[in-house]
Image (cartoon, rainbow, N blue to C red):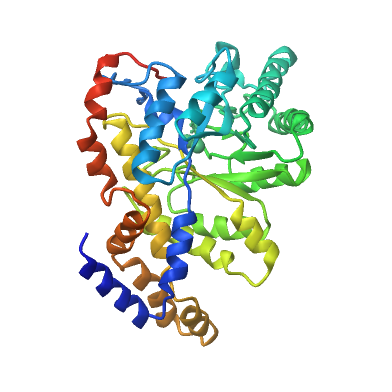
Amino acid sequence: MSDRAYTVFEEIQKNRGINLEQVKERIKQFRVETPSWGYGDSGTRFKVFKQVGVPRNPFEKLDDAAQVHKFTGICPSVALHIPWDKVDDYGKLKQHAEERGLTLGAINPNLFQEDEYIFGSVTNSNPAIRRKAIDHLLECVDIARTVGSKVLSLWFADGTNYPGQADIRRRKHWMREALAEMYKAMDPDMRMLIEYKFFEPGFYHTDLADWGMAYGLALKLGPQAEVLVDTGHHAQGTNVEHIVANLIDEKRLGGFHFNSRKYADDDLIVGAIDPYELFRIFCEIDAAAEDPDESVREHVGRIAYMIDQSHNIEPKIPAMIRSVLNVQTQYAKALLVNRAELADAQSAGDVLAAENAVRSAFEQDVTPLLQAIREEQGLPVDPVKAYMDSGYGSAILARGKGGASW
Ligand code: RM4
Ligand code: MN
Ligand code: MN
């Protein structure tokens, strides 16, 4: 990296009224969690392409996740999906993670892969199936306890395909009963993040279809229940940053699943399609992080930033590094909004100046800033290139084809 590029950047930001030292500190604190399933094979409903070198078990997924952390320095935790990551001894998995400088993050129960769940899991009209589903949720609380995780991240594939197929309100009650039982089993320092999605696999109705349904449920359950926003889970045109601002204001924004989408829940590399949306999301978060009300700042400090992605056609580890860097980049850009200028423009009703205060931050090239930070932290300035040059990608080819996949 050239010192000159950073000096020029520094000068520009000074002129824009930005305190760069504060910005740097915030960027250094920022962390993103990666998903174990993002390292395995995945596909569409048409085909799962098997890549060579894919991890064959949860231990190898952690080995790969450790590479992402090694080159970016900001991904020390890894989310698990159970039973995809089921092992006999979770203590051993935890130790494996720790030996690689990682911790185990959100535990994601999986209630969508068994034949019995054809008509739903916790909302199934068959009480025995509902019991089985709830027992799995409780098992996940135990796993979280064993591995030292504080976050349970819930997404339900429950839904229906046809009008009249099921009693929507009854299913709502069953959902609440199941989550209430799980909630009771959690330790006081655990959090339940409830994820919504408007369709798929259900094509008529989904039991938790939007943020309002997830929020209503979280409110009834109690303060340890919050909403998880997966950026790919909204109808086209939805203003996601508005949802984010609203949930922050209600103090129920538990975390994110970042990915990008063009049409539906595409799970593409974060920031690949609409980086400005991601930037706008971080603008809302950053505004709240500077709120005079300490309880708002504290709430924002607890948000769990996680990636939820499937790499169908691209090599997985560098794709994950790219996603992580894209998140970091938009986070950094949002910190460059001149808040005082924005506030003045808003109170003066100066629409053009307000829009400019936001967009002009997005237009800043933060590459010299991020490179300077990486240098200061002893990280490679170009993490993707450093990974590509490291030889790890060739070494894992020995794993062969046919690794873990959903
Ligand atoms: C869902 C949802 C969940 C994820 C599964 C694999 O669409 O995003 O968070 O665990 O996909
Ligand atoms: Mn998700
Ligand atoms: Mn999804």
Report the residue at 58% width, 50% height from top.
Answer: 303
Residue 44 lies, in percent from the top left, at: 35, 26
In the rendered view, tell whether residue 101 sits above or below residue 304.
above
Front-lying residue, 176 or 41:
41
Q: Which picture quadrant has residue 48?
A: top left
Q: On the rendered structure, is 384 left or right of 144?
A: left
Q: Quadrant location of the C terminus?
A: top left
Q: Which residue is outermost to the bottom? A: 348
- Residue 270 horizontal/vertical position (percent): 37, 45
Q: In x, y percent, where is residue 381?
A: 27, 52
Viewer-proximal residue among 111 and 23: 23
- Horizontally, is 378 left or right of 154 in the view? left
Q: How many marks?
A: 0
In this orientation, does residue 51 appear? no
Of residue 92 and residue 143, the one placed in the foreground of this image is: 92
User: Is 162 above or below relative to 374?
Assistant: above
Q: Residue at x 54, y 67 (%)?
A: 287
Residue drawn at (43%, 17%), measured in percent from left and top? 57
Q: Is residue 13 left or right of residue 75?
A: left
Residue 49 occupies quadrant: top left
Specify whether residue 230 is in view: yes
- Residue 91, horizontal then vertical, whole percent: 59, 21
Residue 399 occupies quadrant = top left
Q: Dividing the image into 4 quarters, which one contains the N terminus? A: bottom left
Looking at the image, residue 227 lies above or below residue 364: above
> Looking at this view, is 256 or 94 the one in front?
94
